[in-house]
Amino acid sequence: MRWPDWNKADKTLLLALLIFFVALVLHLQYPDKAAADAFLFCAEAALVGGIADWFAVTAIFRKPLGFPYHTAILPRRRQAFIQASVTMVQKEFFSRRKVFRHLERLHIMPMLLGWLAEPETENRLVLRLVHFARDFLLKQDARAQAKVIADRFRGTLDALEPEPFFALWGGWLRQTGKDKDFLSRVAVYIRGRVDGEDTRKALAAMFERFGEEKVQDNSLGAFLMGLARAVDLVNYEEAAELVQQQILAMLDDLAQKDSELQREMLQLFYEKAAELNQEPSFHRLVHELKDRLVKDLPLEEAVFRTLDHLHRHFAEDKARHVDPLAEHMPALRTRLEEILRAEYRRMLQLVEKDEELRHTVGQFIYDLIARTALHAQTLVGVIVTNVLSRLTDEQLNHLVYDKVEPDLLWIRMNGSIVGAGIGLVLYGLMALCAP
């Protein structure tokens, strides 16, 4: 062993040995000197004390000089040491009293609410909820889901009264101006159908049939009609073209938003709708149509096909590690995320404002953490047992020795120091008691 690797206790023991040799030489040189005898006596006691304490400390970890009896205590009693360590960790470091004391110092709810209110936490949790909703939908039976949704939809339709619904729908159309947009689109659509050769020919044919019906039983009228057509006084094609132009102009005016014709048409529509709504026969018809619609609509099949289509697309996209909502239905995903985000923030506000709810949630979390920590005592014991059991005897010795090395070194050094002092005292007593 190199000199720099020697610890101070080894150096002290070596110094005691050298001092013993010096004292022995002085004793041999001056055999009649009391000082030389006292010095040798103290040196012997210091050397013996240092060797005895070295033996005692070394016997804890290994067999000093191969001595087999009551040595290498720690390796021989490793199971007892491991069990004692487990008990110390469980009963001292993780005792019920200390666990509860540490938990009482924590302000759980303010910490939790502050963490949940962070934008990063909110985004992460909302994204998790969106993925959870998607995965939850994939795990559900489409046929059973379709039946539940269809039954609820059918129940909603069955409980719906047509008259209030129509009144509400009409009021919404008037307030939002959607009625004008709807009428404009209808006028544009009809204009596209009217503005064509087929419409002009149909009008001409209608005028011609009307003229023939009027003179069918009147010979004079038929003669005059034929004469008028011969001299081009009556021209059905020209009349049809003029009527078509008038219809197109009227439709253009009707399609123009807030035009006089559009306002008059809507006013007439609402008046006639109000009159129709007062008719009992109309009420019976609407209720019959609603009941027949609720009964005959294939809601289950329609919902099932929609859900089955979604399931297949979601499964394919999930296999490709692609978010199906973001790829195929970005509007639905955005709306779902908005709903979840709004509910998430509403939940935080509710917990912050409701003191009783906050106390209940905090108590629940406190009990949960406390019970988890107490149950972890057994787990901690298992971990400590496994870790210490895997250590070799040398590793276990180093683990313990490194923690108490300064104290063990001073024990050995004190053996020499105290031994020298006791040797000096004993020599003095022997000198006083000598004849």
Image (cartoon, grey):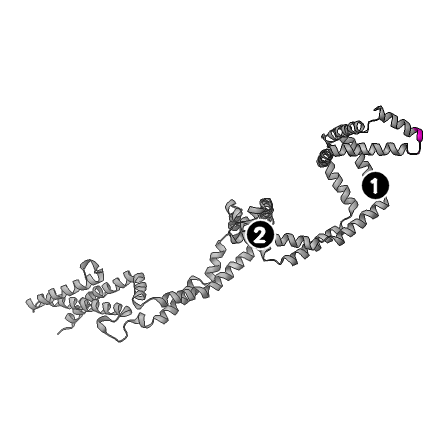
Number of the front mark, 1 or 2: 2
Relative to 343, 212 lies left or right: right
Residue 219 sits inside the magenta stretch: yes
The quarter of the image holding the N terminus is: bottom left
Kind of residue indicated by mark 2 = His
Main structural element of the magenta stretch: helix, strand or loop? loop
The quarter of the image holding the C terminus is: bottom left
What number is the disc on residue 313? 2
Tag 2 or tag 1, which sits nearer the N-term? 1
Q: Residue furthest bottom?
A: 69
What stretch of residues is rendered in magenta? 216-220
Q: Residues within 10 Å of mark 1 (few under 14, many from 20)?
A: few
Relative to 393, 217 lies left or right: right
Q: Are marks 1 and 2 in contact (CB under 8 Å)?
A: no
Indicate the secondary structure of the residue bearing disc 2: helix
Residue drawn at x 85%, y 43% as measured from the top left: 279
Residue 241 percent coordinates (x, y): 77, 28
Residue 354 percent coordinates (x, y): 61, 49
How many numbered tags mark residues here? 2
What number is the disc on residue 418? none
Kind of residue indicated by mark 1 = Leu
Q: Quadrant of residue 379?
A: bottom left
Residue picked out by circle 1: 276
Residue drawn at x 47%, y 63% as measured from the top left: 376
Indicate the secondary structure of the residue bearing disc 1: helix
Residue 108 percent coordinates (x, y): 51, 53
Q: Above or below — where is 177 with respect to 34?
A: above
Relative to 221, 321 lies left or right: left
Residue drawn at x 34%, y 66% as measured from the top left: 391
Q: Residue furthest left?
A: 29
Q: Quadrant of residue 176?
A: top right
